Amino acid sequence: MPASPAPALTASAPPVVHPAGLCESDTVGARTRVWAFAHVLPGAVVGADCNICDHAYVEGGAVLGDRVTVKNRVLIFDGVTVEDDVFLGPAVVFTNDVHPRAHVKKGPDALSRTVVERGATLGAGVVVVCGTRIGHDAFVGAGAVVTGDVAPHAVVVGNPGRRIGWACRCGRRLPGSGVCDCGRRWRLSDEGPVPATPRTSGPAAPAVSSAGSA
Ligand SMILES: CC(C)(COP(=O)(O)OP(=O)(O)OC[C@H]1O[C@@H](n2cnc3c(N)ncnc32)[C@H](O)[C@@H]1OP(=O)(O)O)[C@@H](O)C(=O)NCCC(=O)NCCS
Ligand SMILES: [Zn+2]
């Protein structure tokens, strides 16, 4: 599911803002927690059951879905959409202008959009160059720089980010057999993993290399 455009506020379960946190948005979903020194600006849309940790910054125009984890010191600017169940590790930095100049003022329409699809993980210190789409359930390793689109379930590391394998829903890197330690079974191809349907007869599906380009 994409990020919810405008979470419904319920009086029975309002967001919880630490006394030293600053939440200026009135579109923050139920039970979302905003911790000390985190700042959510007016116009930011944040879903329900999110966790926005100390020193995070969520700019107006940013959109977060439900159950998003925003670890400490994450910077999310206008033009960034983060869908449901995404994990943003400590100090993840988004960008929204590919060619910024201090003397060139740009309005919201001039910003490059970035989307992180549902269930993806961005490890600590990831930098996302704007105008990119990070596919659902992708896993970007610590310290990577994302300079282009990331396929769903791709495991990407390095600068520039390159795919080294495929990630299971549980977060582990999949072996060539497509059978994860968590018990899930996947059919692997160059396009990525798809859930394997149980087979009752016939030859086993061939193993496919799990490495390749992003
Ligand atoms: C990307 C990641 C998931 C890979 O884990 P893994 O599947 O167990 O992979 P391995 O540790 O076996 O490493 C596989 C290869 O990728 C390299 N690698 C792993 N993580 C890397 C990273 N973040 N950047 C660059 N290279 C990395 C390893 O050096 C290894 O290279 P080699 O094959 O040449 O020896 C993991 O290293 C990672 O970065 N996790 C994110 C942790 C994080 O930020 N958590 C935040 C919450 S606290
Ligand atoms: Zn798994």
Image (tube, rainbow, N blue to C red):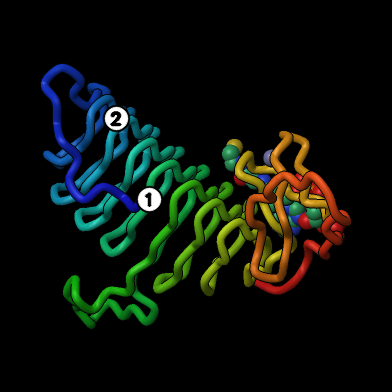
> Percent position (x, y) of residue 4?
26, 47
In the image, farthest residue toward the top: 12
Single out the mark in the foreground, 2 or 1: 1
Name the residue: 43% across, 43% down. 73
Q: Which quadrant does the C terminus fall into?
A: bottom right
Q: Disc 1 designates what residue? A: 83
Check mark 1 vs ligand 1: CB closer than 8 Å? yes or no: no
In the image, farthest residue toward the front: 201
Q: Disc 2 designates what residue? A: 32
Give the camera-side residue of 49 and 44. Answer: 49
Left or right of residue 140, residue 189 in this image? right
Q: Secondary structure at mark 2?
A: loop
Name the residue: 33% across, 60% down. 80
> Percent position (x, y) of residue 196?
69, 50
Q: Quadrant of residue 60?
A: bottom left
Dot 1, crowdedness within 10 Å: few (<14), some or many (≥20)? Answer: many
Give the camera-side residue of 94 and 214. Answer: 214
Name the residue: 19% across, 78% down. 105
Three-letter residue code for mark 2: Thr
Give the camera-side residue of 1 and 11. Answer: 1
Left or right of residue 87, residue 167 in this image? right
Residue 27 appears in the figure: yes
CA distance separating discs 2 and 1: 15 Å
Name the residue: 75% across, 71% down. 212
> Percent position (x, y) of residue 109?
19, 76
